[in-house]
Image (cartoon, rainbow, N blue to C red):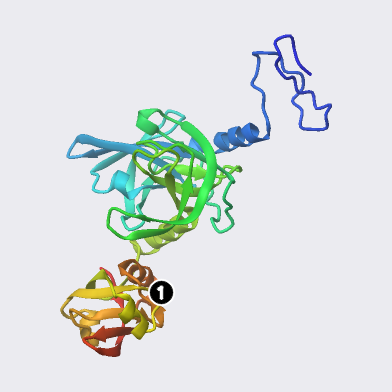
Amino acid sequence: MYDDDGVVLLDGSDGGVGFGSIAAGERPLLDAYSGAVTAAVARATPAVAHLQVEQKGRPVGAGSGFVVTSDGFVLTNSHVVHGADLVRASFPDGTTTRAYPVGDDPDTDLALLQVHNRPAGQLELASSDGLMVGQIAIAVGNPLGFGSTVTAGVVSALGRALRSQSGRLIDDVLQTDAALNPGNSGGPLLDSQGRVIGVNTATIMGAQGLCFAVASNTARFVMGEILRHGRVRRAFFGLAGQTVPLGLGLARRLDRQALTAVRVMEVSAGGPAAMAGVQVGDLLLTADEAELAGVDALHRLLTAERIGKSVALRLLRGREVMTKAVVPAARA
């Protein structure tokens, strides 16, 4: 049914969701999509903070964060608060309070803060395992200082890898076309129920619709590690490597699918690799029979679960293939 101005009036008579007769200009037309977005935002917004960061008494940046527990723990990006002397969190209800650093993990670009004033709301971390490309993605944050700004789009891709400022790859990153701008960093990416599926972290400069968020499962892991240990524990071999090409002939001789491997460029004295007999110049081929196609593959191997457990490193030294048993230590 239409009014005199050609505006559709929803009365539910077609069997769909109806909102009663809506006079033109009195209220917006709501469909299933906009209804889901507005409901999710209404649930989430009270828990999203604008973070103002100072170093040596001077403002150095701003970003977003969001409350994830009833006792005031706040998730945000490492690059927003790393090295800060003072962080202030401002909430939509007008409350401004100091946010105290709890832990920081530049390798995943995540950090945990705590506000001591009881927050007005908190957000639930959903599991990112069941996400599907095309589902609704809603970003809430404070881009360019405009508080409580909302953008919506879809999950564009799953399982991306993004390089953090520390140089390490962040695995399981979500790609979305929900618009992000400076100041959105550290804010939540929500599903249609207002649950957090990611922590907004980066955009590709000069590109349209290429925005990224650290998956909620990664955020849950990092938060748990920080709360239990004060930091994220990772294993440590005590070597520096470089990804190098093998050449087709050598790859075939070594029966490898990958045409690259890891060249050892430095070995730390007294470290696990040195104690196992690994030397500068060795070419690392596999770890526990998994091919090492490059440095990133080596980084992915070095999780906390590997600490203290022997890893069989197969390597090429000169023309000889050998295996060294390396026991990773905890990275300081």
Q: Is residue 316 visible?
A: yes
**Left or right of residue 268, residue 323 in this image:** right
Q: Quadrant of residue 211?
A: top left
* Location of residue 179 with respect to 289 vertically, above or below: above
**Left or right of residue 276, residue 171 in this image:** right
The extreme front residue here reads 249
The residue sitting at 52% across, 51% down in the picture is: 125
Q: Which residue is mark 1?
A: 305
Residue 220: percent from left, percent from top: 46, 57
Q: Nearer the viewer, residue 108 or 92?
A: 108
* Location of residue 121 with respect to 251 vertically, above or below: above
* Location of residue 281 with respect to 191 vertically, above or below: below
Please identify the quadrant where the C terminus is shown.
Answer: bottom left
Q: Is residue 68 visible?
A: no
Residue 99: percent from left, percent from top: 34, 42
Q: Quadrant of residue 208?
A: top left
Q: SS class of the residue under badge 1?
A: helix
Question: Would you call the spot at circle 1 few (<14 residues within 10 Å), some (14-19), or many (20 or more)?
Answer: few
Q: Amino acid at mark 1?
A: Glu
The residue sitting at 17% across, 79% down in the picture is: 280
Q: Nearer the viewer, residue 90 or 13?
A: 13
Residue 217: percent from left, percent from top: 49, 58
The residue sitting at 33% across, 71% down in the picture is: 298
Residue 186: percent from left, percent from top: 39, 44
**Left or right of residue 325, residue 266 in this image:** left
Number of marks:
1
Please identify the quadrant where the N terminus is shown.
Answer: top right
The residue sitting at 67% across, 23% down in the picture is: 29
